[in-house]
Image (cartoon, grey):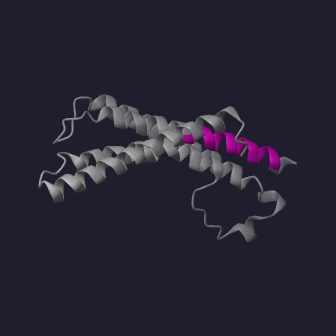
């Protein structure tokens, strides 16, 4: 897809933020290992930090992955489906995927609001910001799939 498109620039910026989170997680892991083996004082809550960072990295970068086609795709039936009457199927699958991820976004918001007071064990970080990150990333990915599906429908028509 076109990287000069506003949606393309937006998902790229989100992926860049996810990359910075990965960089910070790497630094935190190095500090944890250093403190653990040199001073026998591990970084308290390092597993929780890793878990929360993974949520941020995955859901801020999933839209970009979909935008550039970086996901894994298996085309077992492509030969059999490459008929003019069936060329609408990739667009349909993208729109169905968009609906699925929109549903995931709604569920994540519902869960975040229903369990607002939940916090992690060691650091007592609240879970809701990370659940909202899941919702936001899923909604962005749903938008990417919808845009791609519409584009595929237009190409399949002629």
x, y (%) of residue 102?
A: 52, 38
Q: Residue at x 23, y 56 (%)?
A: 33
Instruction: Answer yes or no: is residue 102 visible.
Output: no
Q: Picture quarter containing residue 116?
A: top left
Seen in the image, is 117 located left or right of residue 109?
left
Seen in the image, is 3 located left or right of residue 13?
right
Q: Picture quarter containing residue 49?
A: top left
Residue 17 located within the stretch drawn in magenta = no
Q: In the image, is residue 7 above or below residue 36?
A: above
Q: Residue furthest front?
A: 38
x, y (%) of residue 131?
A: 36, 37
x, y (%) of residue 88?
A: 75, 52
Q: Residue furthest left?
A: 40
Q: In the image, is residue 82 above or below residue 110?
A: below
Magenta region, main secondary structure: helix
Residue 145 located within the stretch drawn in magenta = yes
**What stretch of residues is rendered in magenta?**
141-155
Q: Nearer the viewer, residue 135 or 110?
A: 135
Q: Residue at x 48, y 39 (%)?
A: 17
Seen in the image, is 23 located left or right of residue 69?
left
Q: Residue furthest right?
A: 158
x, y (%) of residue 16?
A: 52, 41
Q: Nearer the viewer, residue 93 or 4?
A: 4
Q: In the image, is residue 119 above or below residue 153?
A: above
The image shows a total of numbered marks equal to 0
Instruction: Answer yes or no: is residue 3 visible.
Output: yes
Q: Residue at x 47, y 45 (%)?
A: 19
Q: Nearer the viewer, residue 36 or 16?
A: 36
């Amino acid at each position: 897809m076109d990287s000069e498109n506003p949606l393309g620039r937006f998902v790229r910026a989100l992926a860049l933020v996810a990359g910075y989170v990965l960089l910070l997680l790497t630094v935190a892991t190095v500090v944890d290992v250093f403190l653990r083996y040199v001073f026998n004082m591990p970084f308290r809550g390092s597993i929780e930090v890793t878990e929360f960072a993974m949520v941020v990295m995955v859901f801020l970068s999933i839209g970009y992955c979909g935008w550039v086609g970086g996901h894994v795709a298996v085309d077992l039936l492509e030969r059999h489906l490459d008929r003019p009457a069936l060329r609408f199927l990739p667009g349909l699958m993208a729109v169905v995927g968009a609906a699925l991820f929109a549903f995931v976004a709604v569920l994540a918001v519902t869960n975040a609001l229903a369990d607002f007071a939940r916090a992690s064990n060691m650091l007592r970080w609240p879970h809701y910001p990370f659940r909202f990150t899941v919702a936001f990333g899923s909604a962005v990915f749903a938008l990417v799939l919808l845009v791609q599906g519409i584009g595929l429908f237009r190409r399949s028509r002629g």
